Image (tube, rainbow, N blue to C red):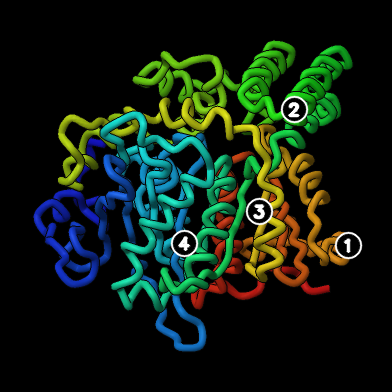
Amino acid sequence: MGKSSSLLPLSLCSLLLCLSLFHVKLANALGTADGSEEWGYVQVRPKAHMFWWLYRSPQRVHSASKPWPTVLWLQGGPGGSGVGVGNFQEIGPLDTDQKPRNSTWLQKADLLFVDNPVGTGYSYVEDKEAFVKTDWEAATDLTTLLKKLYNKNERLQTSPLYIVAESYGGKFAVTLGLSVAKAIKAGELNLTLGGVALGDTWISPEDFVFSWGPLLLDVSRLDYNGANKSNSLAEKIRQQLASSQYGEATETWSQLEEMISSSSNNIDFYNFLLDSENDPLSTVAVASSKKLQISEKLTMKKRYSMYLSSKASSSGSLDDLMNGIIKEKLQIIPKNLSWGDQSDDVFNFLVEDFMKPRISEVDELLSLRVNVTIYNGQVDLICATKGTEAWVQRLKWEGLQNFTNLERKPLYCNNDGVTRGFVKSYQNLHFYWILGAGHFVPVDQPCIALNMVGDITQSPAAAPSWIKKK
């Protein structure tokens, strides 16, 4: 913020001068004159408006045999903004200082960010009754948006779509994947679904809460007393889920997080090697945030924004960026709407779905032969690898035993000979273990994340093999 436009390849100053209305490609969309960016709103239901932002890669390679992919990025929360967080803090072309990001995923694919569900980020509702209450309702809205974007756009149709999600976004991704597959089969949606990728995703809350006590005991952040308390609350959650007491399970989850925080001296739920409040940048970010006054059950979402703010080099908050120069650039955001104003309501209206598992949806995607990729950061706690491995073993997919029996292959970056991760693949299921990464893999391990997305999307720009041959 406050930087000279000479620093920007996508200079905000020049962008403001060259905005144009697209009449042919995407109706009612604004964008840059060179077509490298487009954005707009889709009214997915009466009084429900969803915002999207599409970036086209300057490194796009045209190949009939290997088409250039598009990544649809879905943020977590629920209520986290893909247009804000995913774009400016993780994988987009510019960071929160509006400087070029060397590890942007635009090197491998076009990027489509959507503020999902409605009420998130720049998306908004005119009436609270229009908020979604289930993951499936969110998927229906996203499918409506994709129909609007794709069905009359041949350029988009030639680019296979990969749904890549983080955190709670994984639950949206699997329901959307099934909704898209159904719409394609019915002839209602003209696109090619390349696959679904689940990054540190909240697919099975029960498995994650049961992973916390043993994991933190092993790494000495809980003692036996703390681990026993954790396991006891996890068991309470299990019983509540078995009795379909989903709202109550969400409240117990919040109690469990608070207990772990107090017993571990405030461990960071997004990187269990860190404390949540010992980073001075995090303290600055929290002090400048407009969203401190939130209820106890929003603990995870608060930590989510704190962690990413502390990882960024920004001299100001993401709120300031999105409600300042970005809102001015986009031109179509309602004047009375501030970015993220409705995000707390997004969480509140999804409270009954928050603790529901989506393992069966992953099974269904696999049975439909959709490529499913799972990747997990080694030091994540909230969606710990231990919990992810546990829910994968619950799959009823016929290839699970063969997948389990395979040996992993080591992964490297930049030929440095250092093991950065492991991968295992069988048929249409792929699993990446990312070493040294917490919840936000693209932030913590940008090199390996970039190589991984090249593999997931089969990008024509994918790097040479980064898997060591035995």
Q: What amino acid type is highlighted by mark number 2?
A: Ser
Number of the front mark, 1 or 3? 3
Is 78 left or right of 20, judged from the image as shown?
right
Label 2's element? loop
Whichever of labels 4 and 3 marks the residue nearer the N terminus, that label is 4
Do tag 3 and tag 2 residues touch (Cβ < 8 Å)? no
Do tag 1 and tag 3 residues touch (Cβ < 8 Å)? no
Residue 243: which numbered mark, if any?
A: 2
Residue 364 in view here: yes
Give the residue at x 39% y 16%.
Answer: 287
> As rendered, which of 418 and 192 lies closer to the eye?
192
Residue that mark 4 sits on: 71
Is 237 left or right of 61, judged from the image as shown?
right
Number of the front mark, 1 or 2? 2
Label 4's element? strand
Number of the front mark, 4 or 3? 3
> As rendered, which of 218 and 168 lies closer to the eye?
168
Return the x and y of residue 432 as percentages of the image width and height: 70, 56
C-alpha span from label 2 to label 4:
38 Å
Whichever of labels 2 and 4 marks the residue nearer the N terminus, that label is 4
Return the x and y of residue 109 as percentages of the image width and height: 45, 67
Residue 146 falls in image quadrant:
bottom left
Whichever of labels 1 and 2 marks the residue nearer the N terminus, that label is 2
C-alpha span from label 3 to label 2:
21 Å
Q: What amino acid type is highlighted by mark number 4?
A: Val
> As rendered, which of 35 and 186 lies closer to the eye?
186
Residue 401: which numbered mark, if any?
A: 1
Give the residue at x 79% y 41%.
Answer: 386
Residue 316 in view here: no
